[in-house]
Image (spheres, grey):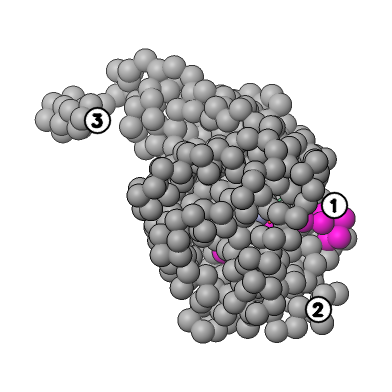
């Protein structure tokens, strides 16, 4: 309403909108308010699109980048922050084409535009920067961000690595579309999210353009680089684009063709596959150890097993399309993807869901496993602890047995449909489950999601 009035005034009063009359603003918050990562994300604006230009030399680890962020102010802004580690040096910042003042400290880039930005105004920020990127260590000790390999980069950014290679609003509640234009020596391949648009070779360097048209949280973005074998084909109605480290070519034999059956099965259970392309990045990175559900194209540190493939593809619905609101809600990703692994194994006839549940439930009552409630894992060091995965999946199975087959799968489909490309938290999942099933489910969720100790059946 306020915005409409402002627009009307602008349209009917023939005054030039000179910056000199812009309203007063206040600084945007330096964080999005997530207790696990207080500095992550920023307040005062909403990013809509990132245009990332990256030029990288794997030998010297020199990165030079130009990031254009198209954003909208959500308050009158005197200044605002982007997240970027200070080991990368910012060379210039413009806001709507005009040079802006900036400072870097810690992982905050503070930008003060020449003129205040009124609430609701669209603006674009261009940041030029360069340096030698490095990964960060997460609270659980794992490597995160721009992780160098022998031939390039394993670029995995959950939960906080995005700030190690481009400036942005790096909390998962601010999703945006992306375009990646990445130049690397022609001996290397640069793979990102979405659709491969072009590949142009010029004097020993190749520029890859990737387009990610559906909204994406920045922890799901990737630009991974290596001596990959690239394959891009249409199989069973999907565009499947894979990049495989030649050392793993034999292990990853037939990988593109393994995607459609999994995606078809999950589409039949969860609803339509939410993205315009799919695929995999298979790197030889045993030192990293973990895979990541990078949007459209998961990243694997080895050739994926059938269960790992199913896990990361299920995340495309649960994690990527529907994304948690806070890091504390991470079981909505990991519990669901683990349950999807169980469903896929059941479908293949390898192991029934019930047997997977029984195996997980068989842990002794005094096992430390039972001390971490999945929906309140107790801090960022526990984000990827086993209970978040296994007890999260067990919660879904207990829900299924309680509400019945029809209601359970209706809940999963409604979750994927109602929050498509958005964010949602545990309270929203509980409310949805109660609405669809018509049951009071507080006791079930309390015991399984929030209370330490082994729940009885
Ligand atoms: N979401 C990933 C998966 O379960 C795990 C990411 C772990 N990240 C980390 N920094 N340890 O597939
Ligand atoms: Zn996962």
Give, as a single range, the part of the protein colored magenta.
Answer: 285-297
Measured as percent of width and height from the top left, residue 232 is found at 60, 78
Which one is closest to the eye, mark 1 or mark 3? 3
Return the residue at label 2: 251
Q: Distance between the Cα atoms at labels 1 and 3?
A: 49 Å
Measured as percent of width and height from the top left, residue 448 is found at 60, 43
Q: Quadrant of residue 170?
A: top right
Q: Quadrant of residue 172?
A: top right
Instruction: Answer yes or no: is residue 209 visible.
Output: no
Q: Nearer the viewer, residue 308 or 187?
A: 308
Principal secondary structure, stretch drawn in magenta: loop
Which of the numbered marks, if any, corresponds to residue 60? Answer: 1
Q: Distance between the Cα atoms at labels 2 and 1?
A: 30 Å
Q: Earlier in the sequence, mark 1 or mark 3?
A: 3
Spot the residue most to the left: 12
Q: Distance between the Cα atoms at labels 3 and 2?
A: 56 Å
Q: Secondary structure at mark 2?
A: loop
């Amino acid at each position: 309403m306020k915005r409409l009035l402002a627009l009307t005034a602008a349209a009917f009063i023939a005054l030039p909108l000179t910056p000199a009359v812009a309203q007063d603003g206040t600084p945007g918050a330096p964080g999005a308010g997530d207790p696990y990562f207080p500095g992550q994300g920023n307040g005062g604006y909403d990013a809509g699109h990132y245009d990332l230009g990256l030029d990288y030399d794997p030998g010297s680890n020199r990165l030079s980048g130009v990031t254009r962020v198209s954003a909208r102010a959500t308050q009158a802004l005197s200044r605002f922050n982007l997240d970027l580690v200070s080991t990368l040096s910012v060379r210039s910042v413009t806001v709507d084409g005009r040079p802006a003042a900036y400072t870097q400290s810690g992982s905050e880039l503070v930008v003060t535009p020449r003129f205040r930005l009124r609430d609701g105004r669209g603006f674009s920020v261009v940041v030029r920067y360069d340096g030698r990127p490095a990964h960060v260590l997460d609270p659980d000790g794992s490597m995160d961000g721009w992780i160098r390999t022998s031939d390039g980069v394993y670029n995995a950014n959950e939960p906080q690595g995005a700030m190690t290679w481009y400036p942005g609003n790096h909390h998962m509640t601010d999703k945006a579309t992306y375009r990646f234009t990445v130049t690397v020596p022609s001996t290397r391949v640069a793979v990102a999210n979405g659709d491969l648009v072009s590949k142009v070779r010029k004097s020993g360097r190749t520029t890859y353009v990737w387009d990610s048209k559906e909204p994406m949280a920045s922890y799901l973005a990737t630009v991974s680089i290596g001596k990959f074998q690239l394959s891009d084909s249409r199989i069973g109605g999907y565009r499947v684009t894979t990049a495989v480290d030649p050392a793993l070519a034999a292990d990853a034999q037939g990988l593109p063709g393994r995607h459609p059956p999994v995606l078809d099965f999950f589409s039949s259970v969860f609803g339509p596959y939410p993205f315009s392309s799919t695929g995999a990045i298979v790197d030889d990175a045993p030192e990293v150890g973990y895979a990541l559900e990078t949007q459209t194209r998961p990243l694997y540190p080895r050739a994926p097993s059938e269960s790992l493939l199913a896990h990361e593809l299920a995340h495309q619905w649960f994690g990527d399309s529907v994304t948690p609101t806070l890091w504390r809600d991470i079981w909505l990703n990991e519990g669901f993807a683990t349950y999807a692994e169980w469903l896929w194994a059941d479908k293949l006839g390898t192991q029934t869901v019930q047997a997977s549940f029984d195996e997980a439930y068989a842990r002794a009552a005094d096992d430390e496993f039972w001390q971490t409630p999945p929906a309140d894992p107790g801090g960022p060091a526990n984000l990827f602890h086993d209970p978040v995965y296994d007890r999260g999946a067990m919660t879904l199975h207990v829900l299924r047995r309680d509400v019945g087959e029809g209601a359970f799968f209706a809940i999963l489909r409604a979750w994927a449909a109602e929050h498509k490309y958005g964010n949602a938290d545990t309270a929203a999942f509980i409310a949805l489950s109660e609405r669809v099933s018509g049951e009071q489910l507080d006791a079930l969720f309390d015991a399984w999601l929030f209370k330490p100790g082994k729940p009885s059946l």
